[in-house]
Image (cartoon, rainbow, N blue to C red):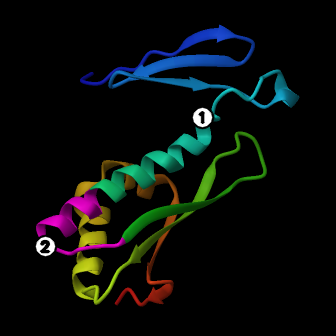
């Protein structure tokens, strides 16, 4: 294996890991014995997806010399009602803000991330129904 992560139990429902030199504490809700001192594990899956594709898109757009005023990625997900509860649908929404943004370059950057570069997307597409939405200055952009 070329990557490894270790998770140490601290107390109650708290666990700690170090990733790339950064400490992360996970915890559970008080209703299940936690103290709410950190995020739950499952939403971190959504954050991993958002972070992976966002970094790709920014990198690609910089190479294309596209200037953005603001950018964020939102991942919406639905999970099953039955145990083991897991995400079965995800919608990735890319929000771009700026003047005279080239839609063709934005679409290309998102497409390249989702089909070629983002390893998290590649894995999730195998297990989850995924959709994509692009919004530029608040307006939804057609993907075709």
**Percent x, y of residue 69:** 35, 72
**Percent x, y of residue 80:** 71, 53
Q: Earlier in the sequence, mark 1 or mark 2?
A: 1
Dot 2 alpha-carbon crowd within 10 angstroms: few under 14, some 14 to 19, many 20 or more: few
56 vs 120, nearest the viewer: 56
Say which residue label 1 marks: 41
Location of residue 53 by image quarter: bottom left
Give yes or no for residue 13 being in the magenta stretch. Answer: no
Q: Residue at x 48, y 19 (%)?
A: 17
**Percent x, y of residue 92:** 48, 66
Dot 1 alpha-carbon crowd within 10 angstroms: few under 14, some 14 to 19, many 20 or more: few
Figure check: 67 above or below 14? below
Where is the N terminus found, in terms of image quarters?
top left
Give the residues in magenta: 56-69
Q: Residue at x 83, y 21 (%)?
A: 33
The CA distance from mark 1 to mark 2 is 35 Å
Say which residue label 2 marks: 64
């Amino acid at each position: 294996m070329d990557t490894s992560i270790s998770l140490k139990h601290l107390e109650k429902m708290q666990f700690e890991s170090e990733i790339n030199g950064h400490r992360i504490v996970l915890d559970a809700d008080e209703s299940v014995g936690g103290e709410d001192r950190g995020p739950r594990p499952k939403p971190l899956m959504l954050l991993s997806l958002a972070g992976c594709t966002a970094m790709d898109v920014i990198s690609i757009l910089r190479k294309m010399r596209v200037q953005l005023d603001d950018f964020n990625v939102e991942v919406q997900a639905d999970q099953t009602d039955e145990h083991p509860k897991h995400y079965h649908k995800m919608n990735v929404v890319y929000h771009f803000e700026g003047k005279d943004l080239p839609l063709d370059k934005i679409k290309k950057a998102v497409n390249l991330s989702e089909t070629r570069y983002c390893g998290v997307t590649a894995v999730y597409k195998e297990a989850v129904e995924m959709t994509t939405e692009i919004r530029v200055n608040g307006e939804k952009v057609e993907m075709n």
